[in-house]
Amino acid sequence: MKFSTLGRLGVAPWLPWGRKHELPDFLRAYESGPWPDPQKPWREARYVVLDVETSGLNERRDSLLAIGLVEIEDGRIRLDRTWHTMIRPPEGLLVAADSIRIHGLMRNELATAPTFEEVLPALIERLAQRVLIVHVSRIDVGFLNRALKQHYGSKLHGPILDTARIAVTMHQRAQMLGAVSHDMPMPAIQLRGLASSFGLPVYGQHDALNDALTTAQVFLAQATRLAQQGKHTLKALLRSGGV
C-alpha cells in the first residue's frame, strides 16, 4: 500500500505535492485522517462500501451519475446509515440510450440532480476515517479520483479494499493449498456471481445503493472466511485485496 510506505518514511500520505489551490475545510479534514489501524482485528475497523453508476466506463470521457454508500461497523451492515444520490452530468454530456437501459437513470431526473461539487461535502464526510470497500476499483476509484483531481487537485486517501481482488486472491490461495485443482479456472468475479457463490441474495443490479449493499454482504462473507483461515487483521485483508 502506498500510504503505508510513505508513513514508514515519515512522510504524511496526504501531503499535497503539486497542489495549486487551497483545499476546502471538509477535504483538509478528510485528508488528515486518522485511518483505521491495520494491525487490529478487521471487525474493529469501520468501513464504508461504495458503488457508482456512470454514463460509460471511460473516466476521462464519461461522468458519475449516482453514488450509493453502505456503512459497516463491528462486522455488521448498518442499514440505518445508507446514503444515495444522483449526480447531474456536466453540461454538454448527453447520457446515451444504451447507458440508460443499463442503470435506468433518466435524463430528466439527472437534469435536476445536484452537481458533483454539491454532493462532495456529504460524500467526503461519510468516507472520512473509514476503510473504503469497492467491487472492481478501476471503475469506482478511477471515476472518483478523476473528479476530485479535476475539481480540487485531490484524490481518495486511506486504505481501500476491492472485493474482486479478494476473490482472485482467495481462489489462488485455494489452488496453492490444494483445495481446488490448479486446472480449475478462476470463477467469474462479477458481483452477482460472487454473491451467489456465498449463498447471498442479489438485489436489483445497476442501482448504486443496491450494488453497495450486495458488495457489503460479499465483503463480510470473504472476511469471515479469511478469518477462519487465520487472517484476522485488517492488514491481512489489505494483503488479500488492497488497492
Image (cartoon, rainbow, N blue to C red):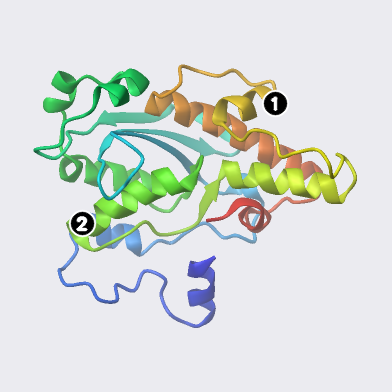
Say which mark, if any, is on residue 150.
2
Q: Quadrant of residue 118?
A: top left
Say which mark, if any, is on residue 197.
1
- Judged left or right of residue 94, residue 174 is right
Q: Nearer the viewer, residue 139 or 209?
A: 139
Q: Quadrant of residue 113?
A: top left
Q: Assign the N terminus to one quadrant of the image.
A: bottom right
Within 10 Å of disc 2 (Cα), the crowding (few <14, some 14-19, many 20+) is: few
Residue at disc 2, secondary structure:
helix
How far is disc 1 from disc 2 in space, using C-alphas? 39 Å
In the rendered structure, which amino acid carries the disc numbered 2? Gln
Mark 1 or mark 2, earlier in chain: 2
Q: Nearer the viewer, residue 87 or 186?
A: 186
x 67%, y 38%: residue: 222
Q: Nearer the viewer, residue 194 or 227?
A: 194
How far from the left and from the top, in percent, is residue 149?
25, 59
x 59%, y 39%: residue: 74
User: Is residue 70 placed above or below 136 in the rendered structure?
Assistant: above
User: Is residue 177 placed above or below 95 in the rendered structure?
Assistant: below
How far from the left and from the top, in percent, is residue 190?
57, 32
Within 10 Å of disc 1 (Cα), the crowding (few <14, some 14-19, many 20+) is: few
Residue at disc 1, secondary structure:
helix
Quick check: can you spot residue 222? yes
- Judged left or right of residue 4, residue 128 is left
x 84%, y 45%: residue: 182
